[in-house]
Image: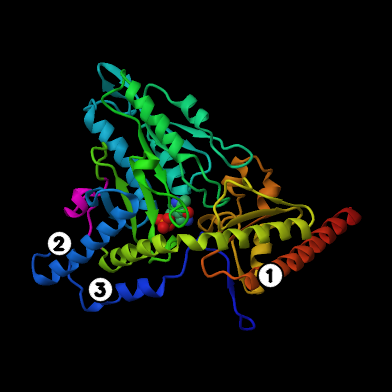
Amino acid sequence: MAKNKKIYLDHAATTPVDQAVLKEMLPYFSEKYGNAMSVHSFGQEALKAVDTARTQVAQFFGAKPSEIIFTSGATESNNLSINGVLKSYYSKFHPVKSAKDGVKQFNGVKIKPHIITTAFEHHCVLDACRASERDGLAEVTFLKPDRDGLISVKEVEKSIKSNTILISIMYVNNEIGTIQPIEKIGKMIKKKNAERNDFSSFPIIFHTDATQAINYFDCNIGKLNVDLLSMSAHKIYGPKGIGVLFIKNGTPIKKIQDGGDQEYKMRAGTHNVPGIVGLGKAIEEVKSQKSKVENIVSLRDYLIKRVLKEIPKTILNGSKHKRSPNNANFSFADVEGEGLLLSLDMEGIACSTGSACSSGALSPSHVLLAIGLKPEQAHGSLRITLGKHTTKQEIDVAISKIKSVVERLRKISGNVLKDFYTKK
Ligand code: PMP
């Protein structure tokens, strides 16, 4: 490793585009630039590329190509899932025009639909659910994960009500990397749907945000028993601004954006052809790289072991065993996360505190609060996420920098407190 080379340990925020992916994408910017909806040869060339990528993605998930919808990323896929299912519910039960409060008629009975999600979802899921609650369109249960960052199948089952129409639970948490039992939850929902009679004309739809799972976990949708699954290409060494929503055939969902007839009329807007091509190639690469996971796991375990042993008053956030191969999330007592992050950045180490999307704000991570950390513990957190190119040498450098920065920041915060008390 060259001296002063920066070390990137923030792969849950985004990943670099693979060279092989970039190579596939390049011709689609200025040579093969047709609009995939155009009938002429330029358009047909672009459409062929979109269809190839759709097949690649479908094969990865064990789905049909017609079940793959290209979106701008997981944020859009998650919003489409929640709002699209709600829209379908309301269109199905022909809302009474006068119902201002979102309470609609169903078999003569006024029923507001119920959504179940978790308190530590990505903000795009949480906020879409909160908005539906605020607008009076749904009632929402936000399940609390346990101290290890896990959601139990039993808890989900206990929360199901006769008016539950949607359950949205993330596969892998983006901050603490914990893995949720999606397959088991899916099986339980399937059973519930089979038994359902009072609300049988609208089944419980199961959605998972699999954005952080694609690189490492089985995403066969038949096995997972999901109806909807979201992802973003830039987390798997593909380009930014492109993602997928898997929609199982027959799922009651309506488009939420008006415009053209793209994507089986489910997502209007000109296809991002280079992005789609890149996504297809990136997902192919994931298939061929699953064998590298063992190396990442052993590096992560080495990092966790050394940090916990060598830096006092440090805890690991999230289950030690049921966590993503690339994730380590620590809380250092008496240290402020933002200070830690900035000091490490000056030392050439890039990681994150809370999620990248919320690190502009100083509020403690909602994920860490949800698993029961005190606000001051949540403030002193650091997320380190490894990638397929991370080396042991990089981890060694990072550990030594984290040690010295934590020590220095603790001294400062100790002195600040000492000054504060002696001046009083
Ligand atoms: N869900 C999860 C679990 C994520 O990690 C992210 C990215 N931080 C998103 C959704 C949103 O992805 P994007 O910004 O690509 O839309």
Residue 108 x/y as whole percent: 25, 16
- What is the quadrant of residue 403 in the picture? bottom right
Residue 46 x/y as whole percent: 19, 68
Residue 381 x/y as whole percent: 66, 54
Which circle's residue, 3 or 2, is located before the other in the chain? 3
Circle 3 crowding by C-alpha within 10 Å: few under 14, some 14–19, many from 20: many
Q: Is mark 1 within 8 Å of ligand 1?
A: no
Which circle's residue, 1 or 3, is located before the other in the chain? 3
184 versus 408 height, above or below: above
Distance from label 2 to label 1 (Cα)?
Answer: 51 Å
Marks 2 and 1: CB-CB under 8 Å? no
Name the outermost residue toward the left.
40
Ligand 1 appears in which quadrant?
Answer: bottom left
Rendered image: mark on residue 396? 1
Scheme by which the image is coloured = rainbow
Total count of labels: 3
Name the residue carrying label 3: 28
Q: Nearer the viewer, mark 1 or mark 3?
A: 1
| Element class at badge 1 | helix
Q: Residue at x 56, y 35 (%)?
A: 144
Name the outermost residue toward the bottom.
2
Which circle's residue, 2 or 1, is located before the other in the chain? 2
Q: Residue at x 71, y 57 (%)?
A: 305
Magenta residues span: 256-271
Query: Left or right: where does residue 296 sit relative to residue 257?
Result: right
| Element class at badge 3 | helix
Q: Residue at x 56, y 58 (%)?
A: 326
